[in-house]
Image (cartoon, grey):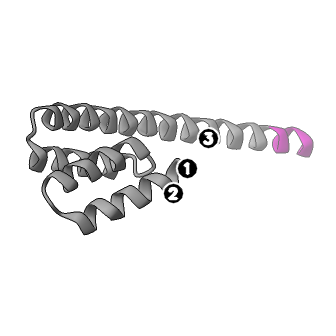
Amino acid sequence: MNDNRSDIAAFNLLSDILKMYQNVRKECLARLGEAELMLKQGSEHLHEKNYQEATVLYTRSLIWNPRDSRVYSNRALCYMRLEKMPRALEDADKCIELDP
C-alpha cells in the first residue's frame, strides 16, 4: 500500500512539474514574440531614419529577450547615427559577445 501511495505522489508531482513547465514555456514564447515585434517595429523606424524611436523599440525588445545580438547590432547603428558613440560601442561589444 505504501508503494502505491508513493507512486501516486510521484505521479502528482510530475504532473505538477509538467504543468509548470508548460506555463513557463508559454510565457517564454509570448516574450519572444513580443521581442520580435519590437525588433520589427524598430527596424521599420531604422529604415525611415527615425533613429531615436528605433532605439526605444530596440531597448524594449531587449527587455523581453536580452540575448538577441541582432537588436544590439541595430541599436548600435542607431546610436552611431545619433552620434552617441560610447553607447554604440557598448552595443557593438555586446553584439560580438553574443554572436562572435
Magenta segment includes 24: no
Measured in 3D between alpha carbons, the distance from the residue under mark 2 to the one under mark 3, in whole angstroms, is: 37 Å
Of discs 2 and 3, which sits in the foreground? 2
Q: Position of residue 49 (x, y in %)?
A: 10, 39
Looking at the rendered structure, the kind of residue marked 3 is Asp
Q: Earlier in the sequence, mark 1 or mark 3?
A: 3
Residue 58 appears at what percent x and percent y?
Answer: 25, 46
In this orientation, which residue lies closer to the viewer: 99 or 22? 99
Q: Disc 1 residue type?
A: Pro
Report the residue at 20% width, 38% height from top: 42
State the extent of the magenta-drawn residues as a range.
1-7
Secondary structure under the numbered disc 2 in the rendered image: helix
Q: Residue at x 20, y 49 (%)?
A: 78
Percent across and percent down for residue 57 are 19, 44
Disc 1 designates what residue? 100
* Amino acid at circle 2: Glu
Q: Main secondary structure of the magenta part?
A: helix
Q: Which residue is mark 2?
A: 97
Picture quarter containing residue 3? top right
